[in-house]
Amino acid sequence: MPETILEARNLTKVYGQNTIFKNINLKVKEGEAIVIIGPSGTGKSTLLRCMNLLTRADGGQILLDGEDITAKGYNEDKVRQHIGMVFQNFLLFNHLTALDNVMIGLTKVKKMPREQAIKKAMEELRRVGLLDRADHYPGQLSGGQQQRVAIARALAMDPRVMLFDEPTSALDPELIGEVLGVMEKLARDRMTMLVVTHEMGFAREVADRIVFMEKGSIVEEGSPDDLFYHPKNDRTREFLWKITELYGKKEKDKGGAA
Amino acid sequence: MSDFPTFFLRFLPDLLHGAGITILITAEGLVAGFILGLLTALARTYGDKFWRGLAVGYIEIFRGTPLLVQLFLIYYGLPGLGITLSRELSAFLALGLNSGAYQAEYLRGSLLAIGEGQMMAGRAIGLSRWKTVWHVILPQALRLAIPAWSNEPVSLLKSTAVVFLIAVPELMARAKSIAAKTYDPIASYLAVAIIYLAMVYLLDLVLRWMENNTRIPGFDMEGKKA
Ligand SMILES: Nc1ncnc2c1ncn2[C@@H]1O[C@H](COP(=O)(O)OP(=O)(O)O)[C@@H](O)[C@H]1O
Ligand SMILES: [Mg+2]
């Protein structure tokens, strides 16, 4: 039985009068790739941001390796180096080269000596296939390359788990494949991952478990086969039907990219 | 007016001496104002309620009153409270405090323009809030601030002329004494105007050089501020 790495218990988030989600329970086990799907505005991004404490949850707990990281006085900065995060719009540090983007966490957070940090950062860039772009600034890279650098930046910290928030949604269709390719490889290497995405092909191929979220709650979860071929809930069925229609069409239009 | 060149050359050494003092007090005010302005901008953008309030109060007071009033309050007013400062120190304080309020606003604008995303990305890899400000936000914000901030050195240079009113022997004070001595105010103030113009021109060159040499390759600040 693999260990639970990251867990949300009865997690609740409220913005003003709006309850974004309520009593969410979610377990991410070691080596598992979980894909969260659901309509936009449902609270998926907010959930991910709560999981690494970028946003404070209003109720419930988050456990990392069994430790309650939402407990009062817990060192947030320490927690975040163990939870990698990749954003929809990359958010690379614009004033730093690809190499420095990947290195900064090593030198400034982990206090790794420079030589060692360079070596490690180069290794991470190689992992995402961008060794030859080490000295490029974000503004000199394509969206797909920027996102791969962002993945390398998160991986460099040797996180226990990686969170991906729609990592390909901001990309031109022809660039989506290279990012999904890197993520697939990570999953094959048994990196523990929690991925929000609309890429159903990726979800079907890579996910160990798919979680369907709607209007702030988890409607259904299960293996890709269960969800895609035997959804229990009508809303799941409807959503999957819509999204396959929408994205399938887009893929066909673009000549089957991604 | 026909012998203005002769007049100009005759008093040039004296005027240049005054210009030197003008440049010195401009530089001092600029540096003091920069440090103060940066701290104020950070306090106003990232501080808690108390620091934000303090920053806003300082900015409003010093941008909302004339520099001359601030100068006189410091030089003639403070002795009433038992604090007597030299002319030079009074000028330095007034210019530094005044410039700091303006620089705070320029710098705050660019801090805000960098956006929440960079802060989030910094926090996500485990950098603390202030480390993110230092290593991520500031390096970008300072570059971004240069075009708007470039008004300040020029504006401050010209503002220093008011300190002749408390008899700091800078450029304007020299002009006044030359005018009194020669009974030729037109030539005196014209000569001073030429020297101010020359200084502003040189300053502009330096600022443009700075702007060009701090560009981030591939990153145009207008286009994307993630
Ligand atoms: N900082 C915020 N303040 C107020 N409301 C927010 C904030 N962030 C997100 N929301 C709201 O929370 C809801 C869920 O947003 P989000 O988590 O981005 O959904 P998703 O990622 O599923 O599209 C939306 O209605 C959004 O408007
Ligand atoms: Mg989202």
Image (tube, coloured by chain):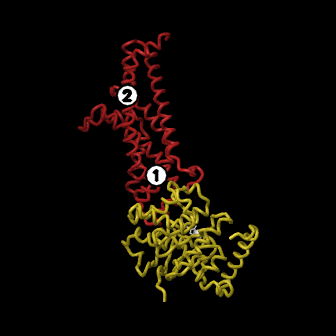
Chain colours: A yellow, B red
Closer to the camera, A69 or A205?
A205
Residue identified by numbered label 1:
B139
Q: Residue at x 36, y 26 (%)?
A: B170
Name the quadrant containing residue B98.
top left
Lateral position of residue B189 relative to residue A86, left or right: left
Closer to the camera, A241 or A127?
A127
- Indicate whether A103 appears above or below A22: above
- Indicate whether A51 appears above or below B91: below
Instruction: Tell me whether the residue at label 1 lies in contact with that at label 2, contact meaning CB atoms closer than 8 angstroms.
Output: no
Tag 2: Cα neighbours inside 10 Å, few (<14), some, or many (≥20)?
Answer: some
Residue identified by numbered label 2:
B20
Q: Residue at x 73, y 71 (%)?
A: A256
Between disc 1 and disc 2, whose residue precedes? 2
Q: Residue furthest top?
A: B2
Q: Amino acid at mark 2?
A: Gly
Task: Locate residue A138, reporting x and y percent.
Answer: 56, 57
- Which chain contains the residue that carries disc 1? B
Lateral position of residue B215 relative to residue A198, left or right: left
Lateral position of residue A69 relative to residue A224, left or right: left
Whether residue B61 is visible here, answered yes or no, is no
Q: What numbered label is drawn on residue B210?
A: none
Q: Residue at x 53, y 50 (%)?
A: B216
Q: Amino acid at mark 1?
A: Pro
Quarter of image, ligand 1 = bottom right
Task: Locate residue A44, reporting x and y percent.
Answer: 57, 73
